Amino acid sequence: MVQHNEEISRRLPLRGEIWFVQIPTDPAGKGPRPVVIVSADGRNKNPRADTVLVAPLTTTIHKEVPTQIYLPSGETGLQEDSCVRAENITVVRKQELREPRSGLRRLSNTRICQIAEGVKVAMAC
């Protein structure tokens, strides 16, 4: 019963927010990385959906790569500039997400749609 109460009190991720998670495909020993929640809030808020769709961020910046969307630190609240890696969009369990620290910002709908365009490029659509 205690575990159920903890789940109820846990804040749900919202579209455009930056959270931290260990990406299963990252090299062993790599810690949690920032990700942008890109799934729709209808899914994110649904208690029966235990996963969310995320796009990982990286500080290795290649502005000329069409699947990577540059984000200045002032837009994210992170300490360094970063890029969203739309080519590495993935699904993670909500329970594995780590709450963002205060000061991180929520990306705009325009930015989320830019990420979606990067996914389309990665899929050659």
Image (cartoon, helix red, strand yellow):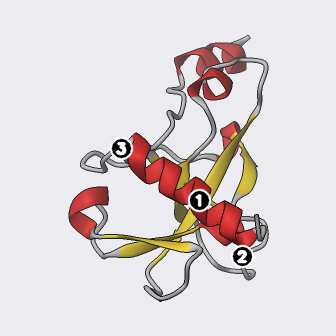
**Nearer the observer, disc 3 or disc 1?**
1
Q: Is residue 37 above or below residue 79?
A: above
Q: Is residue 11 above or below residue 59?
A: above
Element carrying mark 1: helix
Total count of labels: 3
- Quadrant location of residue 102? top left
- Dot 1 amino acid type: Glu
Element carrying mark 3: loop
Depth check: give the residue in front, 45 or 119: 119
Query: How crowded is the residue under tag 3: few (<14 C-alpha within 10 Å), some, or many (20+)?
Result: some
- Residue topped by disc 2: 26
Quadrant for the N terminus in the image: top right
Depth check: give the residue in front, 86 or 9: 86
- Residue topped by disc 3: 106
Q: Position of residue 65 (x, y in %)?
A: 54, 85
Query: Which residue does the image show at 24% across and 49% down from the upper left?
Result: 103
Q: Position of residue 101 (x, y in %)?
A: 34, 49
Depth check: give the residue in front, 15 or 80: 15
- Residue topped by disc 1: 117
Residue 14 visible (yes or no): yes
Left-right relation of 50 to 36 = right
- Dot 3 amino acid type: Arg
Q: Are marks 2 and 3 in contact (CB under 8 Å)?
A: no
Q: Earlier in the sequence, mark 3 or mark 1?
A: 3
Q: Position of residue 125 (x, y in %)?
A: 76, 64
